Amino acid sequence: MSSDFTQRWSRRMFLGGSMAGLAAPSIAQQSNDTVEIEADIGHEVQRNISSFRTLDWRPYFSNTTNGAILVDITSRALHFWSADQAVYRLYPTSVPMTDDLTRRGRTEVVQLVEGPSWSPTPAMRERNPEWPDFVGPGPDNPLGTHALHLSWQYYRIHGTHDTRKIGRRSSNGCIGLYNEHIAELYQRTRIGTQVLLI
């Protein structure tokens, strides 16, 4: 076999694999399982992606009045259902860095803020005395472009300008989303939307 043929074949496999990788996020939201073709062994292998799967609202809420948000800390995913259940969205999130920063249970959205400002909590000041006392809206703000304030003091679902945080244990207690996702959720959420963190 010529080296020219081998280079072309390797390039085709690389390009095919790259294109399959680009399609993966849309596949992840449509199915509980994916099928991966492993070129080196030539057969199908089932891969379970249960950590990022669609869910039904009924096991978690008695109704969807005012809409419902479920945050799954373990899978690092936020699920949203509209009040009439016509809209369902699934978003990747950042979650608290440690269990002692994590709060679970039922709360609700009490304020919607576009262009939020940020100040560290007393506990954050203690851990990080070098942090600024206040950060106004803009690209340096850790709350991103929008914030949903919860009935628990200091807890929010908000955006982030640092996209590396999404999908990781990287927050001081809040739930973070990509800015484009929090902007969409902000438009669909209202005061009184019920929230459950599990």
Image (tube, rainbow, N blue to C red):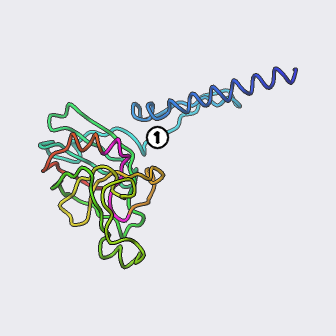
Q: Quadrant of residue 157?
A: bottom left
Query: How many numbered discs sit on the rendered protein?
Result: 1
Q: Quadrant of the C terminus?
A: bottom left
- Give the residue drawn at x 38%, y 40%: 53
Q: Which residue extends farthest right?
A: 2
Residue 79 on the magenta segment:
no
- Give the residue drawn at x 40%, y 72%: 131
Q: Is residue 44 above or below residue 112?
A: above
Residue 79 shown left or right of residue 25 in the figure: left
Q: Is residue 100 above or below residue 15?
A: below
Q: Is residue 24 above or below residue 61?
A: above
Q: Camera-side residue: 57 or 113?
A: 113
Q: Quadrant of residue 168?
A: bottom left
Q: Name the kind of residue labelled 1 in the image.
A: Ile
Residue beneath disc 1: 49
Q: Residues within 10 Å of mark 1 (few under 14, many from 20)?
A: few
Residue 172 shown left or right of residue 47 in the figure: left
Q: Quadrant of the N terminus?
A: top right
Residue 10: x and y in percent read: 74, 27
Q: Camera-side residue: 62 or 88?
A: 88
- Give the residue drawn at x 28%, y 50%: 146
Residue 189: x and y in percent read: 19, 44
Residue 180 on the magenta segment:
yes
Residue 51 shown left or right of residue 40 in the figure: left
Residue 142: x and y in percent read: 37, 58
Which region is colored magenta? 172-182
Q: Is residue 52 above or below residue 10?
A: below
Residue 67: x and y in percent read: 17, 42
Q: Secondary structure at mark 1?
A: loop
